[in-house]
Image (spheres, grey):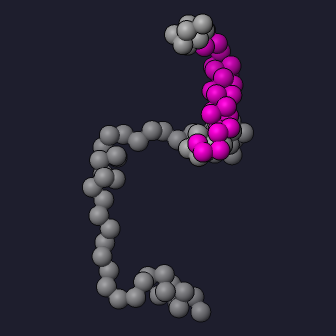
């Protein structure tokens, strides 16, 4: 069977069956211990399916561009984390 034939068969499945296929594929890819990203994706999908995480929408091009242009603010003096710790004492 070719990849195109497999994809055509997957398109005929119900949405729930397609989710099961996706989960199985993610878990298969995640079995490679060197593929951290695939394992993270499989974990995230399982959490979403169990209602523990809300599905995330892909970032828009505008959001990606905004992230690329981000410049952190330079602050003089001691780190803010030190100030917070001191104030909590």
Locate residue 28: give its quadrant: top right
Query: Residue 23 in magenta?
Result: yes
Looking at the image, which is closer to me, 85 or 4?
Answer: 4
Residue 37 visible within the image: yes
Q: Give the image location of residue 10, x and y in percent.
A: 60, 13
Is 87 above or below relative to 39? below
Q: Position of residue 6 (x, y in %)?
A: 59, 11
In reply to whether residue 59 is colored magenta, the answer given is no
Question: Where does the C terminus fall, quadrant-wise?
Answer: bottom right
User: Image quadrant of residue 74?
Assistant: bottom left
* Any part of residue 8 in sight: no
Residue 6 shown left or right of residue 71 in the figure? right
Residue drawn at the location 65% of the way across and 15% of the way down: 14
Q: Give me the residue at 32% from left, 68% from top.
A: 72
- State the predominant SS element of the stretch in magenta: helix
Which portion, as a residue range, is magenta? 10-35
Residue 45 at x, y = what percent?
A: 63, 38
State which quarter of the image contains the N terminus: top right
| Residue sitting farthest toward the right | 50
In the depicted view, which residue is nearer to us: 51 or 18?
18
The residue that appears at 29% across and 64% down in the rendered structure is 71
**Residue 23 in picture, x, y percent from top left:** 66, 30
């Amino acid at each position: 069977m070719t990849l195109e034939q497999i994809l055509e068969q997957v398109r005929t499945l119900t949405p729930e069956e397609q989710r099961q296929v996706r989960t199985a594929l993610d878990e298969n890819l995640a079995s490679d211990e060197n593929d951290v990203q695939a394992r993270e994706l499989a974990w995230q999908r399982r959490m979403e399916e169990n209602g523990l995480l809300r599905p995330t929408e892909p970032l828009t091009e505008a959001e990606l561009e905004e992230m690329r242009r981000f410049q952190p603010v330079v602050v003089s003096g001691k780190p803010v984390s030190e100030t917070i710790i001191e104030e909590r004492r």
